[in-house]
Amino acid sequence: MLGNLNHVALAVPNLKAAQKAYEDSLGAKLSQPQALPEHGVTVVFVELPNTKIELLEPLGEDSPIAGFLKKNPDGGMHHLCYEVNDILHARDHLVENGARVLGDGEPKVGAHGKPVLFLHPKDFFGTLIELEQV
Ligand code: CO
């Protein structure tokens, strides 16, 4: 069911500082910042040869990553994103196997303009998982 690792997401308290660290210190290639008000984040992608790193900064009042940054003020790994071919089939399979899908269980449009779902971290060993249909 799982395809490629699409990205690893890091929650960061300051996107400018994170961009600088990745661009200047690590010499990485970065995308332009993209505000996603419906997801409560501003996102920058670090382009690597085999995958991407998603830098997430809170956007707006009740950002879903605000609580994470409260617990991890320096930032930290927030989620992994795996690619799937058929997100509804993947969801139904996961639910049948007892996994919990966050929110109303319906895919939303993610940062790449493709349908995404999130799975409860307690069902996957403390790691929040994003599925993206490709
Ligand atoms: Co993501």
Image (tube, rainbow, N blue to C red):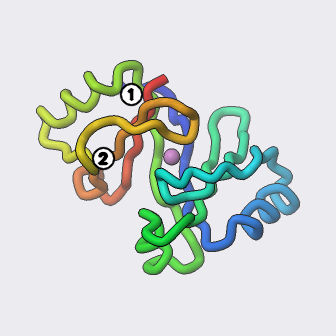
Residue 35 is situated, as x and y percent measured from the top left of the image, at 63, 53
Query: Label 2's element?
Result: strand
Which residue, given by chain and number where applicable, does mark 1 sit on? 2
Q: Label 2 sits on what residue type?
A: Leu
Determine contact: label 1, label 2, CB under 8 Å: no
In this view, 25 is above or below 1 = below
Residue found at x 81% / y 44%: 29
Q: Earlier in the sequence, mark 1 or mark 2?
A: 1
What residue is pinned by disc 2? Answer: 119
Q: CA distance from mark 1 to mark 2?
A: 14 Å
Give SS at disc 1. loop
Q: Which amino acid lies under the numbered mark 1 shown in the image of this protein?
A: Leu
x then y, percent, for residue 32: 76, 47
Q: Residue at x 13, y 42 (%)?
A: 98
| 29 vs 39, nearest the viewer | 39
Q: Position of residue 63 (x, y in %)?
A: 46, 65
Q: Quadrant of residue 130?
A: top left
Q: Residue at x 53, y 54 (%)?
A: 37
Residue at x-position 57% and y-position 35%: 112
